[in-house]
Amino acid sequence: KAGVTQTPRYLIKTRGQQVTLSCSPISGHRSVSWYQQTPGQGLQFLFEYFSETQRNKGNFPGRFSGRQFSNSRSEMNVSTLELGDSALYLCASSLEGGAPYEQYFGPGTRLTVT
Amino acid sequence: QKEVEQNSGPLSVPEGAIASLNCTYSDRGSQSFFWYRQYSGKSPELIMSIYSNGDKEDGRFTAQLNKASQYVSLLIRDSQPSDSATYLCAELVGRGSTLGRLYFGRGTQLTVWP
């Protein structure tokens, strides 16, 4: 079974631009979560989607948004990029229902904002 | 404020030794815990999940959960140089329809030397 895929793997953007990252979950997984990882803050939760609905949201500004499609694929968007948005963005999928609700991560998208 | 604290490390052990990684959490209601391994430049990889008090063994890995003392540990027996990585402890927060959010510790860097 194929794992979580994320595109693109690397991205360089300029301050003020916007960016869209894509995530395809493991087949059959309907929950998709997004995380930001930086050396200074570690792994931080952005938001989680299930059945095209945002179910959980972390403490990030409104510039960070996401959505999920009917095939469970998800996208996240960051508008008006800032230097501090440079990070590894990780998507994780999980199988809804029952224990243990394990989340499996994709390879990530490395975003550099210059 | 939910917190997951890990022994900061770095931890260095010789090949063949037992590596012990520890994590404490603040939310007494948390039910599920996970250990992820992250190699440098890669995404986190799920290696263990545990949600009942006691031990759970998988090959060379043993996860231990003590809900009364609010700690989770990971033991790696017969450590190998290939185990050298950062180990992340995570706590699943939420119930029912609000499941989906993992809180991560900052990680413990493990080095296994030949």
Image (cartoon, coloured by chain):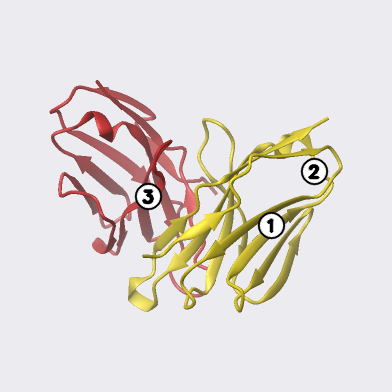
Residue B74 - label: 1
In the figure, residue A50 lies in which quadrant? bottom left
Residue sticking out furthest to the right:
B16
Q: Chain under label 2?
A: B
Residue A12 - label: none
Chain B's colour is yellow
In the image, residue A1 above or below residue B80? below
In the figure, residue A75 lies in which quadrant? top left
**From the viewer's perspective, is A8 left or right of A61?**
right
Residue at the (49%, 77%) spot, across then down? B28
Picture quarter with the C terminus of chain A: top left
Chain A's colour is red
Kind of residue indicated by mark 3: Gln
Which callout, 2 or 1, points at the residue further toward the start of the chain? 1
Residue at the (21%, 42%) spot, across then down? A77
Please state the total of marks drawn on the protein image.
3
Q: In x, y percent, where is residue A49? A: 30, 59
Tell whether label 3 touches label 1 (CB within 8 Å): no
In the image, residue A26 above or below residue B2? above
Kind of residue indicated by mark 2: Ser
Given residues B66 and A4, the one toward you in this image is: B66
Q: In x, y percent, where is residue B29? A: 47, 78
**From the viewer's perspective, is A31 left or right of A77?**
right
List the residue tagged with mark 3: A44
Kind of residue indicated by mark 1: Leu
Residue at the (52%, 74%) spot, across then down? B31
Q: In x, y percent, where is residue B95? A: 39, 77
Tell whether label 2 touches label 3 (CB within 8 Å): no
The Cα atoms of the two marked residues, 1 and 3, are separated by 22 Å
Residue B79 - label: 2
Label 1 crowd bin: few (<14), some (14–19), many (20+), radius 10 Å: many
